[in-house]
Image (cartoon, grey):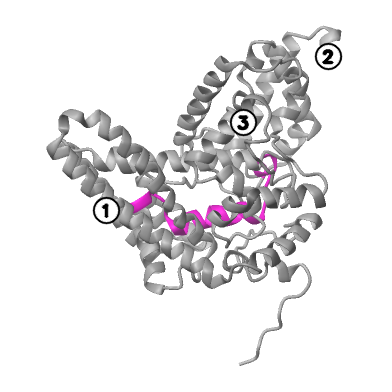
């Protein structure tokens, strides 16, 4: 057997990534311009830094431990629930609240479904355990490792920035391929029956059939349990999984609140609630807590997707510092709305204690809205971005001012021309364009004074 030459140059940095090797044959995958030169330099440094302390075997042991913790935690919650539900039903509100908090943190170990997308050949070092993840991922988390891998790998290598994604021919919107299928279970059957879709998107139909049977079995068990007056699966499994998925999607769109098509420090922003300014630190803290640190680790995660996220969470401040000191054009604690509405946000003074309370409830509103996004409703996950930055901007500015800033931004990236040139317009591009035309009409009907324009 002829030995294949080792990759050289930039390809040596990412060419051995399992997810890249698995996805590179996709017919719409654009293998050009995947990485900014400075981001590639960071990838090389990060890979070397990680492997000075950890091996691939260490990665596998960590993920295997996460699976065991998820399994033991789930079994422990079942036992605790059965005991408390039978013996202390009158105190259900008290012990239920405590068990719900535990469930959120146990659910975070379901991150292995995400990591399986990045390690399709060997996640845990055990073929049996990897097969278990592939088979039980759907009924245990509502997430299909195969379908998730398709949408997530595209999000790692093509059209990284949120602005780029609305024009993408590779990235798939959530209404086409949701994160989970609790509210639209029939979509799984549609995928199974669509042989062309499964072939084009590299989906294993046999595996998807097994997952679908398991998922429908889960739904049947949950409905049967509710019918008999019990609510474990709904309250302590399904809802926490919704919260985790929603917080991670919000974290990801925050990190990717940029314009670049390739992986760069513009499209992969860095965040740290401890150094964030004003009310924006509230959603950063909140989503980091309930989303397994997604807003902290996601940009770094793009540089080496196989690294277990707990390693990045433990070391993200040191890594951030290295990036800030050694690379240029780094987007740090900043999202697109801060640039678009900069003139209005500058009017705001320091927030008070009440403002932080309101900011928390704004974070909850965005979280709940995103729950509908992850199950496939056509709701862009960025719709509340400005609200998360600082809700007070809506009280110190007029609609005409906010719309004028937004219209100016969309004109600056030639939205009108790009929309007309797009052959396959995805749901979010249509939504953005329709909103743009409405805002443009409103601004034309409510012109700003010259002083405001200046």
Image position of 420 with respect to 388: above or below: below
Q: Name the residue under label 1.
A: 75
* Residue drawn at x 48%, y 47% as measured from the top left: 177
Q: Crowding at label 3, few (<14), some or many (≥20) Cα neighbours within 10 Å?
A: many
Mark 2 residue crowding within 10 angstroms, few (<14) / some (14–19) / many (20+): few
Query: In the rendered structure, are the residues bearing label 3 and label 2 in contact, judged by CB atoms less than 8 Å apart?
Result: no
Mark 3 residue element: helix
Q: Residue 453 carries which label?
A: 2
Q: In which quarter of the image is residue 8?
A: bottom right
Judging by the rendered image, the residue that carries numbered circle 3 is 281
Depth check, front residue: 432 or 355 = 355
User: Residue 400's spot in the image, x, y percent?
Assistant: 71, 12
Q: Give the range drawn in magenta.
A: 140-167
Reply yes or no: does residue 151 show up in magenta.
yes
- Circle 1 packing at 10 Å, graded few (<14), some (14-19), many (20+), is few
Residue 420 lies in what quarter of the image? top right
- Res. 375 visible in picture: no
């Amino acid at each position: 057997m002829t030995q294949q030459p080792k990759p050289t140059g930039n390809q040596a940095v990412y060419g051995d990534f399992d997810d890249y090797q698995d996805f590179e044959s996709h017919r719409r995958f654009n293998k050009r311009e995947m990485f900014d030169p400075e981001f590639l330099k960071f990838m090389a440094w990060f890979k070397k830094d990680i492997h000075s302390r950890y091996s691939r075997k260490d990665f596998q042991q960590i993920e295997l431990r996460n699976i065991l913790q998820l399994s033991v935690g789930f079994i422990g919650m079942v036992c605790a629930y059965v005991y408390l539900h039978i013996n202390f039903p009158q105190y259900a509100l008290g012990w239920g609240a405590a068990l719900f908090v535990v469930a959120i943190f146990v659910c975070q170990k379901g991150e292995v479904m995400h990591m399986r997308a990045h390690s399709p050949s060997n996640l845990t070092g055990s073929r049996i355990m990897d097969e278990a993840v592939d088979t039980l991922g759907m009924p245990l988390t509502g997430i299909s490792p195969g379908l998730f891998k398709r949408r997530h790998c595209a999000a790692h290598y093509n059209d990284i920035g949120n602005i780029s994604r609305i024009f993408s021919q590779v990235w798939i919107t959530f209404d086409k391929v949701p994160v989970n299928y609790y509210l639209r279970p029939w979509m799984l059957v549609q995928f199974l029956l669509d042989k062309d879709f499964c072939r084009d998107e590299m989906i294993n139909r046999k595996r998807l059939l097994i997952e679908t049977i398991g998922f429908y079995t889960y739904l049947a068990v949950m409905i049967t349990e509710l019918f008999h007056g019990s609510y474990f699966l709904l309250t302590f499994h399904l809802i926490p999984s919704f919260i985790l998925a929603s917080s991670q999607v919000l974290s990801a769109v925050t990190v990717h609140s940029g314009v670049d098509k390739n992986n760069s420090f513009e499209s992969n922003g860095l965040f740290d609630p401890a150094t964030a300014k004003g009310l924006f630190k509230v959603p950063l803290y909140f989503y980091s807590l309930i989303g397994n640190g997604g807003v902290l680790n996601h940009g770094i995660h793009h540089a080496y997707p196989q690294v277990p996220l707990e390693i990045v969470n433990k070391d993200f401040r040191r890594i951030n510092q290295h990036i800030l000191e050694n690379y240029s054009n780094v987007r740090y604690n900043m999202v697109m709305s801060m640039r678009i509405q900069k003139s209005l946000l500058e009017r705001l003074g320091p927030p008070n204690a009440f403002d932080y309370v309101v900011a928390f409830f704004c974070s909850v509103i965005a979280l709940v809205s995103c729950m509908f996004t992850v199950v496939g409703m056509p709701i862009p996950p960025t719709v509340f971005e400005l609200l998360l930055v600082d809700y007070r901007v809506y009280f110190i500015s007029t609609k005409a001012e906010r719309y004028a800033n937004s219209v100016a931004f969309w004109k600056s990236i030639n939205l009108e021309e790009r929309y007309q040139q797009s052959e396959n317009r995805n749901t979010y591009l249509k939504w953005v364009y329709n909103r743009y035309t409405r805002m443009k009409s409103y601004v034309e009907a409510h012109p700003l004074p010259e002083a405001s324009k200046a």
